[in-house]
Image (tube, rainbow, N blue to C red):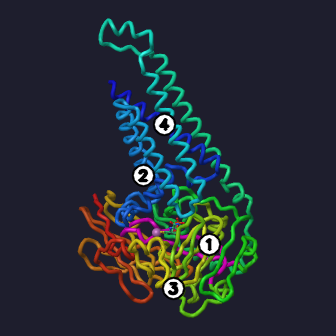
Amino acid sequence: MRWVTAAGRGLLAAAAALGTAELAAGAIGRATASPVLAVGAGFIDLTPSWLKDFAIRTFGSNDKTVLLIGLGCGIAAAAAVIGLLSRRRLLWGLLGLALFGVVGVVAALTRPTAEAVDVIPAVFGAACGMAALALLTRSIRPTSGEATREEAGPIRVYDRRRVLLTSAGVAVAAAATGVGGRALLRRDNVSAVRRRLRLPAPVSRAKPVPSGAQVRVPGMTPFRTANSGFYRVDTALVLPQVDPRDWTLRIHGMVARPVELTFDDLLKLDLVERDITLSCVSNQVGGNLAGNARWLGAPLAPLLRRAGVRSGADQILSRSSDGMTISTPLQTVLDGRDALLAVGMNGEPLPIAHGFPARMVVPGLYGYVSATKWVVDLKVTRFATDQAYWTKRDYAERAPVKTFSRIDVPKPLARIKAGRVAVAGTAWAQHRGIDAVEWQVDDGPWRPAQLAPVPGIDTWQQWVAEWDAVPGSHTLRVRATDGTGATQPERRAPPLPDGATGWHSVVVTVT
Ligand SMILES: Nc1nc2c(c(=O)[nH]1)N[C@H]1C(S)=C(S)[C@@H](COP(=O)(O)O)O[C@H]1N2
Ligand SMILES: [Mo]
């Protein structure tokens, strides 16, 4: 029982440390200096590619919640150990909390956007945590009145009221400072600015989406992905809050005339509207890390021409406000495709999670080599000179999206009635387009599926087929052929280093 209360004191002291650190982060207005978030972000950066890939594949857009829960458990375990150590000697507990502080400081200072003030939250928090632990430990010392009782036997008597009051006081202080800190950090939230923002109309509208693009089969994926349902993949534990009034984009490096744009400058350019499907390299066969949106943005190529790209350059190294870097093959951006500096998504300003106020979108490339959110800087450079976040972590420099096809209906392990059954799904090979989709039941012949019409080669495409289902357990399989005539390979390859391959299959039971 004693050790449970000792562990409890450690937990309370750690809570006080984290709460007060949060308050300090709020006071200096630096969310990335919050020790929990800084340690979490450091963790993301140190995670080996295979594990990160596993996390994205397994948890998808919830990867950060899972990370934070894991981190919370780790902190709680360490805090309990600190409490137990403090039972032997208070100093050991204090040293444990100091170590907490050191980890927090190192994490905060190694963020790409770190500033010297970022040490404050971890240092202040550790100091408060140590004070809390000292207070809590003092509260369990037998009071003088008990000294006489002690003579009567080995039982030590604590002032229960004092212990409870001290514990409750620390708990309330931890919660109040934590909540207060979060509230202060919310001051920087740009949601209100975003809501008021009105985007100009495009000079060139998106091609109308043909009426049949959406296959009419219950349970089918929508052709256009709503912003609220759009997958999210990034390294940002704290969503960058970039006020368009402060935003600038610098285009520099191997250029004749560096360019600097404000957000107003950007909105004055000739904006175009395009339907483009974005997909993630971590998407596994049958996965849903892909979405199709109507983007509004300025074509990137004219901006680069305005800057005057010098010969020998082969890469655009883009940087986001939170220090993330992404490398994009320059040739791809200049080859005539609709590479955009996007400001709008499905008729509204980019959602904050999707890059507000501006991001890149390049049809045909995986997001990690093209789709920089919260973008603030474009450096024209060479692959031989500069590497980006993911390419430093073993992912390929050149990563055109691979041809994918997916069975969306029926769902895996569905139980369906024998007879006529609609089989439908989605296929994509952005900027090459889909030429054919074939499907197969068990090891039967490959049959052509019917392709729904699409507005162009930069979006995904739906397909549908009719199946005369007979009772039994069956495997349905699908494969697509892209606009160059290449058929998806059957061989399963993992997402690392340049995207997964393999045929998607679904097992269903027909009764
Ligand atoms: N700033 C920033 N931009 C980023 C990333 C990131 O981690 N940080 N991730 C990229 C990856 S891997 C993908 S797949 C796309 C996902 O864009 P979405 O979250 O809007 O769907 O964003 C890209 N842009
Ligand atoms: Mo990605």
Secondary structure beneath label 2: helix
**Would you say residue 298 sits in the magenta stretch?**
yes
- Residue beneath disc 2: 66
Residue under label 4, please give it.
Answer: 130
Mark 2 against mark 4, which lies toward the viewer?
4
Crowd band around label 3 with a 10 angstrom C-alpha radius: few (<14), some (14–19), many (20+): some
Please state which of residues 454 and 197 is positioned toward the viewer in this rendering: 197
Q: What's the residue at 64%, 79% (across, down)? A: 251
Q: Amino acid at mark 4?
A: Met
> Which part of the image, by quadrant, shows the N terminus?
top left
- Specify start and end residues of the magenta stretch as a single range: 271-300
When the figure is inspected, residue 221 is found, relative to residue 174, above or below; the finding is: below
Residue 129 position in % (x across, y down): 50, 37
Mainly helix, strand or loop, the magenta region? strand
How far is the residue under mark 3 from the one under mark 4?
50 Å
Q: Position of residue 311 (x, y in %)?
A: 57, 93
Sequence-wise, the earlier of marks 1 and 4 is: 4
Marks 1 and 3 close (CB-CB < 8 Å): no
Mark with earlier residue (2, 1): 2
Using the numbered discs, state the Cα–Cα distance from disc 2 to disc 1 in whole angstroms. 30 Å
Mark 2: few/some/many CA within 10 Å (<14, 14-19, 20+):
few
Nearer mark to the viewer, of 2 and 1 = 2
Q: Is residue 345 left or right of residue 141?
A: right
